[in-house]
Image (spheres, rainbow, N blue to C red):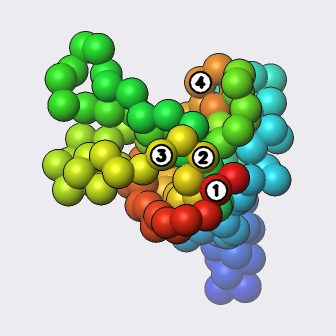
Amino acid sequence: MSKTKTAISIIAFALSVPPQVLGQSSQVFGVDDIARIAQTSRDNAARFNRDFRGQSFKAKLPVRSISENFLIPERYTATFGKNPFGGNVTCDVKDRPTINLMMDWERGQIVTISGTIRSTMMGDIRLDDCRYVPHPGEKG
């Protein structure tokens, strides 16, 4: 195979591989993308995995709830958003410093939440590696 054909093959392969496979993030998704991400997950899991899993997410959302995992003590699920069913963002919380930080949060307090999209459940986006920046005094 000629050097030109080899170079073209390498470029074509690189363009066909999703950015998250190469360890790159092509964009940061946000609150306006939640419904589309959840719908894609319901309609076509393969497309969800290609387009969204492993991608970055960041949004400024109100605290909806922080609930204890009934199967694993000292592990919590933090939910951010305003929707009663779906359209929210959830994170599992197990580290003590973060749990201590969340103890003072109230429902409706605004928090900037960021992480890596893992999956969806009941219309909510589940993130890994969550990071939080609370905005005391701001309510949503």
Whether 58 is drawn above or below 43: the answer is below
Depth check: give the residue in front, 28 or 12: 28
Secondary structure under badge 3? loop
The CA span between labels 1 and 2 is 5 Å
Residue tagged 1: 139
> What residue is rendered at 80% in x and 30% in y?
39
Q: Which three-letter amino acid code belongs to the residue tagged 1? A: Lys
Residue tagged 4: 121
Residue tagged 3: 106
Of marks 4 and 2, which one's residue comes earlier in the chain? 2
Of marks 1 and 4, which one's residue comes earlier in the chain? 4
Depth check: give the residue in front, 11 or 4: 11
Of marks 1 and 2, which one's residue comes earlier in the chain? 2
Residue tagged 2: 108
Badge 1, how many Cα within 10 Å: few under 14, some, many 20+?
Answer: some
> What residue is rendered at 71% in x and 58% in y?
30
Where is residue 55? Give x, y as percent. 59, 56
Image disc number at residue 71 = none
From the viewer's perspective, is 41 left or right of 49? right
